[in-house]
Image (tube, grey):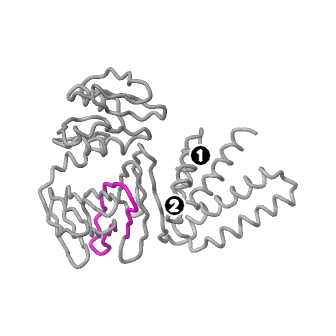
């Protein structure tokens, strides 16, 4: 198989994955399977190409037509005596040509999209209206645009929105118990279970929660969760949005909270075995995903030592404690 056929195969598989990921909810097993496929050589580029093509093409008013042409192309491949792999490539190529060609002949229409990141991954995407969304680790987001509004759903995780201004077509983000409405602004939304945190960096937003409506101005944040009345507060926006620059800032956080934040970016979580230090205060700055730097800082500040178990998870134990496994060999000091 030559390189050209290899790229065509990758794009055909990418098109299948793109279609499969449009139907929410997406199971964890499906996401893990997708991320494993995307890590293979050339697959990330193939998926990006397909994704950009779909964004440009929009709905096209003809998914059924595309399927019909693809099937027709497949049957023509049969008549030409092509092999199974070649028939699939031929059909996929015809479908891509149809979509691309429609850019010149069909009106642009909106379509639903979904975007996601794996644990430790961050991703920036351009939406069809010109807005920019940056997704943090382990996040899932979907879009649904109409003529009157731009609807976004943050299924889980965290996202930073830079919204293209359009007063006649509000930008609405639904995130669990909170619905955030903006016309042109910059804000951060984090959804953790049944809690949603909104931080406004620039502009203004209205946040609806049940029968309550709150208005935020630049430099404010709001937490929405069951059983509590949401009240706007002054926010340290640089700290809250540091993740958009690949940094994690912790200021006077409990050790338990600091560990939870660090664990969001790793498949090998840190465990605190000695709960006597759960409320110990921790402050520091490190790169997202830099677990060794965090471990070095904690063990330098507190009488704890790091032990790595057979799964790769790091346990923080008291100086006299022990756990089955080996001690972490981390020698880095400071927080980077």
* x and y, in percent, of residue 283 in the image: 18, 37
Residue at image mark 1: 37
**In terms of image quadrants, where is residue 204?**
bottom left
Image point 63% across, 50% down: which residue?
11
Sequence order check, earlier mark of 2 and 1: 2
Residue located at (59% from left, 38% from top): 41
Which type of secondary structure does the marked residue at label 2 adopt? loop
Looking at the picture, tell me which residue is in the foreground, 94 or 101.
94
Going 27% across and 70% down the picture, which residue do you hit? 181
Furthest residue in direction left, as rendered: 234
Tell me where the magenta segment starts and ends, as one range.
151-174
Figure check: 233 above or below 265:
below
Whether residue 163 is in magenta: the answer is: yes
Location of residue 244 in the rendering, given as x and y in whole percent from the top left corner: 30, 46
Separation (CA) of disc 2 from disc 1: 16 Å
Which is nearer the eye, 312 or 221?
312
Task: Examine the residues drawn in magenta and state their main secondary structure.
Answer: strand
Q: Which mark is residue 289?
A: none
The disc placed on residue 26 is 2
Q: Nearer the viewer, residue 32 or 214?
A: 32
Label 1, residues with CA under 10 Å away: few <14, some 14-19, many ≥20: some
237 to 300, vertically: above or below: below
Snapshot quadrant of residue 325: top left
């Amino acid at each position: 198989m030559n390189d050209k056929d290899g790229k065509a195969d990758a794009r055909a598989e990418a098109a299948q994955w793109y279609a499969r990921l449009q139907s929410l909810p997406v199971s964890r097993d499906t996401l893990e399977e997708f991320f494993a496929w995307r890590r293979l050589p050339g697959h990330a580029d193939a998926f990006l190409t397909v994704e950009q093509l779909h964004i440009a093409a929009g709905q096209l008013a003809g998914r059924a037509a595309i399927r019909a042409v693809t099937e027709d192309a497949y049957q023509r491949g049969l008549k030409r005596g092509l092999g199974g792999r070649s028939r699939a490539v031929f059909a996929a190529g015809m479908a891509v040509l149809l979509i691309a060609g429609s850019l010149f002949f069909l009106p642009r229409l909106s379509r639903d999209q979904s975007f996601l990141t794996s644990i430790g991954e961050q991703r920036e995407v351009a939406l069809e209206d010109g807005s920019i969304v940056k997704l943090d680790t382990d996040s899932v987001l979907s879009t649904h645009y109409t003529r009157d509004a731009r609807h976004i759903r943050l299924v889980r995780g965290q996202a930073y929105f830079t919204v293209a201004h359009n007063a006649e077509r509000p930008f609405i983000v639904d995130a669990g118990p909170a619905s955030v409405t903006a016309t042109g602004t910059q804000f951060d939304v984090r959804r953790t279970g049944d809690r949603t945190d909104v931080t406004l960096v620039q502009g203004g937003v209205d946040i609806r929660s049940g029968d309550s409506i709150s208005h935020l101005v630049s430099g404010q944040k709001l937490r929405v969760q069951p059983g509590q009345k949401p009240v706007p507060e002054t926010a340290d926006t640089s700290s809250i949005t540091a993740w958009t620059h690949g940094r994690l800032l912790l200021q006077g956080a409990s050790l338990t909270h600091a560990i939870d934040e660090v664990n969001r970016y790793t498949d090998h979580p840190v465990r605190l075995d000695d709960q006597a230090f759960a409320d110990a205060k921790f402050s520091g700055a490190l790169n997202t995903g830099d677990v060794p730097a965090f471990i070095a800082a904690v063990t330098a500040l507190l009488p704890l030592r790091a032990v790595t178990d057979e799964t790769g998870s790091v346990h923080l134990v008291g100086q006299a404690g022990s756990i089955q496994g080996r001690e972490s060999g981390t020698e880095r000091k400071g927080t980077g």
